[in-house]
Image: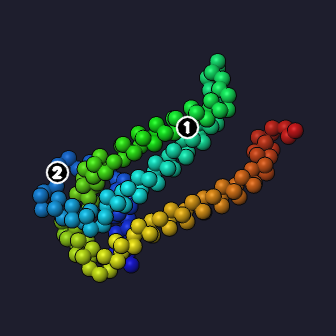
Amino acid sequence: MRKAALLLALIGAGAFGQSTAPNSPDPKKLALIEEVLADTNAEQVHSLLRTLIVTASCDRFRLSLENLKYPEGLHLEPAQKQIVVNRLVEDLGKLLNEKLRWENWKPRLLQTYDATYTTEELRGLAEFLRSPAGKAFIAKSPRVLEESQLMAKRFADGVNTEFGQNLPDLIRGIFIENGIPLR
């Protein structure tokens, strides 16, 4: 089980690390890294994570834009504001998708693996991934990631709902703490 948890961290979190390794890995180590990436379906996992990042970033950006105070003299009707918000969110999504393309990300991932794992550790990972347990782990990882995403969203939605329901009391408490008169 510890190997599986370690591998999930390797697949998910490792995809977003950055390394300061100045040199390219030696060819034998690079071949092992490529093997581990292929065996873990790293490109597919990256695609899932990229979708999560782009969606979450665009959602947060949309919220901030919808609450944005526009500069004086620039008044937009609600329909006009929606056009601006939609366009800016679309542009951000395109930019993020471009920056997070596998071809742009893979060199960073190779450096991260090179800086993080020894050749011997990579051999052990490759051996595990070829085993029946490793193959099952890889086959089931996308489902675990998707379920984890849904679970996190449901949890966050519940917290947000609860927080929103308590907002009037929280604001009232802040007013009282800071001596702001209640009206």
Q: Residue at x 46, y 37 (%)?
A: 91
Query: Between residues 118 and 88, which one lies in front from this camera angle?
Result: 88
* Residue 27 image point, x, y percent: 12, 58
Quarter of the image containing the N terminus? bottom left
Q: Nearer the viewer, mark 1 or mark 2?
A: 1
- Disc number for residue 86: 1
* Above or below, comparing residue 5 to residue 80 in the picture: below
* Above or below, comparing residue 66 to residue 161 in the picture: above
Q: Secondary structure at mark 2?
A: loop
* Residue 83 image point, x, y percent: 58, 33
Quarter of the view holding residue 65: top right
Quick check: can you spot residue 118?
A: no
Quarter of the view holding residue 67: top right
Q: In the displayed image of the protein, which residue is found farthest to the bottom?
A: 132
* Lower position in the chain sequence, tag 1 or tag 2: 2
Quarter of the image containing the C terminus? top right
Side (left or right) of 10 relative to 179: left
Q: In the displayed image of the protein, which residue is found farthest to the right?
A: 183
